Image (cartoon, grey):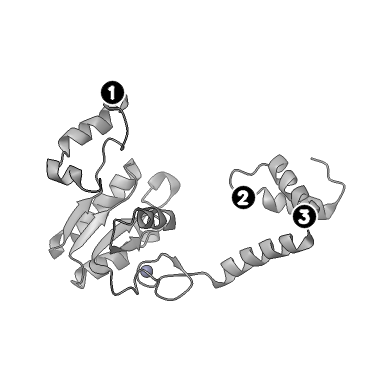
Amino acid sequence: MEFSSKLLERAVNEMSRLPGIGKRTALRLVLHLLKQPKDQTLFLSEALTAMREDIRFCESCHNISDVEVCEICSNAARNHAVVCVVEDVRDVMAIENTGQFRGIYHVLSGKISPIDGVGPGQLNIASLVAKVQAGTVQEVIFALSPTMEGDTTNFYIYRQIKDYGVTTSAIARGIAVGDELEYADEVTLGRSILQRVPFENSLKGQ
Ligand SMILES: [Zn+2]
C-alpha cells in the first residue's frame, strides 16, 4: 500500500495492529476520523490513553476495575463464600447480565493452554487457592468455556482445592433454551442426559 503521507501511513499501521483489522479497514477507519471533527479523534485517543494509564485490576478477584477493590467484591450484600471462576471480564459481564448470581468472582485472565504457551503460573490461580485455603470460601463454581483448555484448567484448580472442604460445582452444559433436541450435537445431548436435573429445578427461572 503506497501512502501519500507518512502521518497517514503511521496511523494506518497502528490501527491495523488491532485484531481483525486489516490494512484496508484501517485505512477506511483513519479516513473516517479525518472527515469527522478533530475533537472526536482527541476523545478517542484520550479515552484509550486514560484506560491504559489508570485502569486497575481488583486486588481480590482480578476483574478490571477503577478502584483497588471492585464494586462486586466490596458489596456486602453479595455472598462472599460463593466464588465463580471465570476466564475474563467478558464472562463476569455476561453472568452479571443474567441477574441470577449473587456470589463473587475470581477472574483467571485466561485458560491453561500449552499450545499457546500459557501455563498455570501465568494465570490468577495461586490467589484463588490461597482464598480457599484461608477457609472463607464454601463453594467454587467453575464457569469456564466447555473446551479442552477450560476442562484442563478446571481440573488443575480442582486438584489444588479439593482437600480443603470446599464444595465444587460446574455450570450446567446442555441443550440451549429454545433449541430443538434433534439438532443438538451428540456430545451436548449426551451430557444433558447424564447431567439431568430434578424436574422441580428445571422450573426455576421460568
Ligand atoms: Zn473484585
Of callouts 3 and 1, the N-terminal one: 3
Determine which residue is flagged by label 1.
Answer: 182
* Residue type, label 3: Gln
Q: Is residue 8 left or right of residue 117?
A: right
Determine the residue positioned at 41% across, 56% down.
93
> Callout 1: 10 Å neighbours few (<14), some, many (20+)?
few
Determine which residue is flagged by label 3.
Answer: 36
Q: Is residue 19 left or right of residue 137?
A: right
Is label 3 in a helix, a strand or a loop?
loop
* Labels 3 & 1 near each other (Cβ < 8 A): no
Of callouts 2 and 3, the N-terminal one: 2
Mark number displayed over residue 108: none
Determine the residue positioned at 62% across, 63% down.
48
Q: CA distance from mark 2 to mark 1?
A: 40 Å
Is label 2 in a helix, a strand or a loop?
loop
Task: Please tell me which residue lies in front, 92 or 159.
Answer: 92
Is label 1 in a helix, a strand or a loop?
helix
Q: Is residue 44 left or right of residue 63?
A: right
> Callout 3: 10 Å neighbours few (<14), some, many (20+)?
few
Return the x and y of residue 116 as percentages of the image width and height.
Answer: 44, 47
* Residue type, label 1: Glu
* Labels 2 & 3 near each other (Cβ < 8 A): no
Return the x and y of residue 74 as percentages of the image width and height.
Answer: 35, 74
Q: Nearer the viewer, mark 2 or mark 3?
A: 3
Return the x and y of residue 61 as percentages of the image width and height.
Answer: 35, 67
Of callouts 2 and 1, the N-terminal one: 2
Q: Relative to residue 169, is residue 105 depicted above or below?
A: below
> Callout 2: 10 Å neighbours few (<14), some, many (20+)?
few
